[in-house]
Image: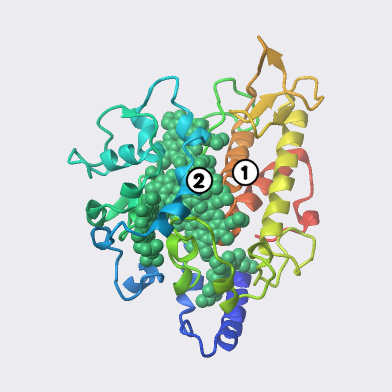
Amino acid sequence: MPAHRTRAALAVLSAVALLSAGHAVLGQGEPSSGGAGHAGGPGGAQSQPQDEQSVIPFAIPRAGPFNAAEVEIRNSEAITDWFRSAHADAAAEAFRHWDEDEEINAACATCHSGEGFRDYHGLDGTEAGVVNGPIDTGGVVDCGTCHNAGLAEVTEVEFPSGLMHPVQGVEASCMTCHQGRTAGTDVAAAVAGRETDTPDAELRFINPHYATAAATWLGGYGGSGYHYDGKTYSGRFFHARPVASCNSCHEPHTLEVAFEPCLTCHQADEPQGIRISRQSYDGSGDTSKGIRDDIAANADLLLDLIEAYSAEVALVPIVYDGSRYPYFFADSNGDGMADQANGKAVPYNAWTPRSLRAAYNWKLVTADPGNYAHNPAYVLELLHDAIEDLTGPLGRDMDALGLLR
Ligand code: HEC
Ligand code: HEC
Ligand code: HEC
Ligand code: HEC
Ligand code: HEC
C-alpha cells in the first residue's frame, strides 16, 4: 500500500478510536488490518490475517465458526428473507441460462445451482473439486448450499489464479461462487509474444464474469486483475475486524448490507458516501465525496481512453454495450453503434495486447458494484495502471490528469 494511503488509514484509526469509544468494537481496527497489502499473485500466501479471529464472522462471535448442522431450519423469517433475495430468484438469467439445454454443464454448475455447488465440493458424497456430471436446471442458491454440515470440512477454495485460499465455515460458499472465472495471468498468457499495439484478430475479449466480490476482496493476492510489469498491488482488504468477512456486512438471507454498523467507524449519509482518504484519486481534488466516486470517475476515464486508443492507435473504433455479451463490439464507422452482420452485432476484432489488458481490468473492476467497500486500494491501482498504459501511445499527459495511485 502506498505511503499516502497508509497515512490516511492511520489518521482514520485515531478517529475510529474516538468515535467508537464505549462500543464493543473499540480497538478492533488494528493498524495491521490497514497495511497488510502486498505485491501479490498466485501462490503468495503471506497475506493471511495474523490473528485467526479476524476470519470468524462477527455476526456469530460466541458460537465460533458457523456450524451449519446445528442450525435448525425453522425460522420462517430466514425463508422469507431468502425468498426475496437474488439467490432465490429462479427467473433470473443466472439460473435460466441453461433452460434450452435442459441441463447445466459441469463448468457452470458449481455456481449456478445449489446441487452443482454440493457436487463440486463433494457434499453429495462424490469426489470433491469437480462437478461429476451435468446438473438439472431449475436450481437456485438453496438453503442446503450454505446449511450443509459438510461445508465445515471445506478448508480452502481454489481461485482462478490457482491460489488456494483458506476459508472457514459458510464463507467457503461465498468465496466459491463470487470469485469470477479468470485471472490476470489468463490475460498475460493470451497477449504473450504479440506486438503491444498491433491489432490481432486472434485476440478475444476475456470476461472476468459477474458479481466478482471475492476476487476484488482478495486483491493482488487473489491475482484476478491484470498486473502491469514493475507495479506492486495491494493484497486482501483487511478493513477492520468487525467487517472482515462477507457475512459481517451482508445479511446472508436478504444479502443486504446494513448501513448503521458502518457508522461506528465512518461518517457518511450512505455507504457510497464513505471516505477516509484525504487525497483525491481522480484528479478532481474533491475529497468530500465517497471513495466510490473516485473509482467510478477513473473507470469512466479508462473506458474513454480505451475508445480513443482503439480509434486513434488500433485504428478500429470500439463500442461498449453492457447489455450484450461479449460487451465490446466493432464500430468501423465510429458512429457509436455496433457493426451488424447477419443481424448480429460484430464482436470487437481488433484487440491489441494493450487494449485487451486495459478492457479486462476495466470490466473486472466494474463487474463488482461493491468494489469500493470490497477493496478500494486494489481497484484504484488497476484503473490507474491501465490509464497510464494507454496515455503513452495516445500522447496524453498522464501527469496533467492529476491521478493518484
Ligand atoms: C470497526 C471500524 C469499521 C467499520 C465498522 C467499518 N469500517 Fe470501513 N473502514 C475502516 C477503516 C479502519 C478503514 C481504512 C482501512 C484501510 O484503508 O486499510 C475503512 C475503509 C473503508 C472504505 C474505504 C475508504 C477510503 O477512502 O479508502 C470504505 C468504502 C469503507 N470502509 C466502507 C465501509 C462500510 C460500507 C462499512 C459498513 C458495512 C464499514 N466500512 C464499516 C473501519 C471500519
Ligand atoms: C465461479 C462461479 C461461476 C462459474 C463457474 C460460472 N458462473 Fe456464471 N455467474 C456467477 C455469478 C456469481 C453470477 C451472478 C451475477 C449477478 O447477476 O449478480 C453469474 C452470472 C451469470 C450469468 C448472468 C449474467 C447477467 O448478465 O445477468 C450468465 C449468463 C452466466 N453467469 C453464465 C455462465 C456460464 C455459461 C458459465 C459456464 C461456462 C458460468 N456462468 C460459470 C458465477 C459463476
Ligand atoms: C448464502 C448462504 C445461505 C443461504 C442460501 C441460506 N442461509 Fe440461512 N444462514 C446463513 C448464515 C451464514 C447464517 C448465520 C447467520 C448468523 O448467525 O447471523 C444463517 C442462519 C440461518 C438461521 C438461524 C437464524 C438466523 O436467521 O440467523 C436459520 C433458521 C436459517 N439460516 C435458515 C435458512 C433457510 C430456511 C434457508 C433457505 C430458505 C437459508 N437459511 C438459506 C447462510 C445462508
Ligand atoms: C452456489 C453459488 C453461490 C453461493 C454459494 C453464493 N452466491 Fe451469492 N449469488 C450467486 C448468484 C448466481 C447470484 C445472482 C443471482 C441472480 O442473478 O438472481 C448471486 C447474488 C448475490 C448477491 C446479489 C447480487 C445482485 O445482483 O443483486 C449478493 C450480495 C451475494 N450473492 C452475496 C453472497 C454471499 C455473501 C454469499 C455467502 C454467504 C453468497 N452470495 C453465496 C451465487 C452464489
Ligand atoms: C465492508 C463490508 C462488506 C464486506 C466485507 C463485503 N461486502 Fe459485498 N458489498 C458491500 C457493499 C457496501 C456493497 C454495495 C452495495 C450497494 O451499493 O448496494 C456490496 C456489494 C456486493 C455485491 C454486489 C451486489 C449487487 O447489488 O450487485 C456482491 C455480489 C457482494 N457484495 C458479495 C460479497 C462477498 C461474496 C463478500 C465476501 C468475499 C463481500 N461481499 C464482502 C459491503 C461488503
The residue positioned 48% from the left and 28% from the top of the image is 97
Is residue 284 depicted above or below 125 in this figure?
below
Amino acid type at mark 1: Trp
Report whether 115 appears left or right of 379: left
The residue where tag 1 is placed is 362
Report whether 90 appears left or right of 279: left
The residue where tag 2 is placed is 86
The residue positioned 72% from the left and 18% from the top of the image is 339
Expressed as whole percent of the image width and height from the top left, the position of residue 48 reads 37, 65
- Which is more toward the observer, 87 or 54? 87
Expressed as whole percent of the image width and height from the top left, the position of residue 315 reads 74, 25
Expressed as whole percent of the image width and height from the top left, the position of residue 210 reads 52, 41
Quarter of the picture holding the N terminus? bottom right
- Which is more toward the observer, 223 or 366? 366
- Dot 2, how many residues are within 10 Å of its Cα: few (below 14), some (14-19), or many (20+)? some
Q: Residue furthest bottom?
A: 22
